[in-house]
Image: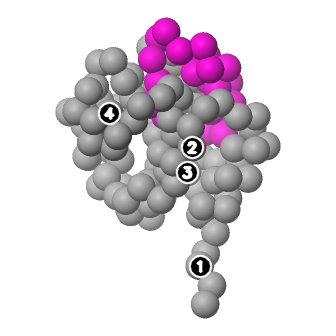
């Protein structure tokens, strides 16, 4: 698996405990694979996001080839797919690599407080 520096790895076995049970801090999950070129492009972006937002956002990655149960559960069909979870629920899906600025913008939009 392509390891982004500062980004923890999760598996089918610990996904619930490390992602779905997380409260108070959103979790960004990257579904990745060794054969995925865009995943390699995204790795330094995720490392930067993980470092810059460590106090407000957990960033983890899961190897799609080794963890088919989670891939199937969330209907992941393309790599990389990013799923943003808040209080155990997916709130945004992002498919494909992006520059850091665009990714941060999408994350900020998804995490913005809802106003009535």
Q: Which of the two labelled residues, at mark 1 and mark 3, occupies the earlier sequence position?
A: 3
Instruction: Look at 67% across and 52% down and name the residue there.
Output: 106
Quarter of the image with the N terminus in it? top left
Q: Which of the two labelled residues, at mark 2 and mark 1, occupies the earlier sequence position?
A: 2
Q: Name the residue under label 3.
A: 57
The secondary element bearing badge 3 is classed as loop
Q: Report the span colored magenta.
A: 30-50
Asked if disc 4 and disc 1 are in contact, CB closer than 8 Å, the reply is: no
Q: Which of the two labelled residues, at mark 4 and mark 2, occupies the earlier sequence position?
A: 4
Q: Does the magenta stretch include residue 85?
A: no
Q: Mark 1 points at which residue?
A: 114
The secondary element bearing badge 2 is classed as strand
Q: Residue 56 carries which label?
A: none
Q: Which of 24 and 30 is in front in this view?
A: 30
Q: Which of the two labelled residues, at mark 4 and mark 1, occupies the earlier sequence position?
A: 4
In the image, residue 99 above or below residue 24: above
Instruction: Look at 45% across and 17% down and name the residue there.
Output: 33
């Amino acid at each position: 698996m392509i390891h982004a520096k500062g980004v923890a790895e999760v598996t089918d076995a610990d996904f619930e405990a490390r992602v779905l049970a997380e409260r108070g801090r959103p979790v960004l999950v990257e579904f990745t694979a060794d054969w995925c070129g865009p995943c390699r492009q995204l790795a330094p972006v995720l490392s930067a996001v993980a470092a810059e937002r460590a106090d407000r956002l957990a960033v983890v990655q899961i190897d799609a080839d080794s963890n088919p149960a989670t891939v199937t559960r969330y209907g992941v069909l393309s790599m990389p797919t990013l799923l943003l979870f808040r209080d155990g629920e997916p709130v945004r899906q992002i498919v494909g690599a992006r520059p850091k600025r665009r990714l941060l913008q999408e994350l900020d939009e998804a995490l913005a407080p809802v106003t009535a």
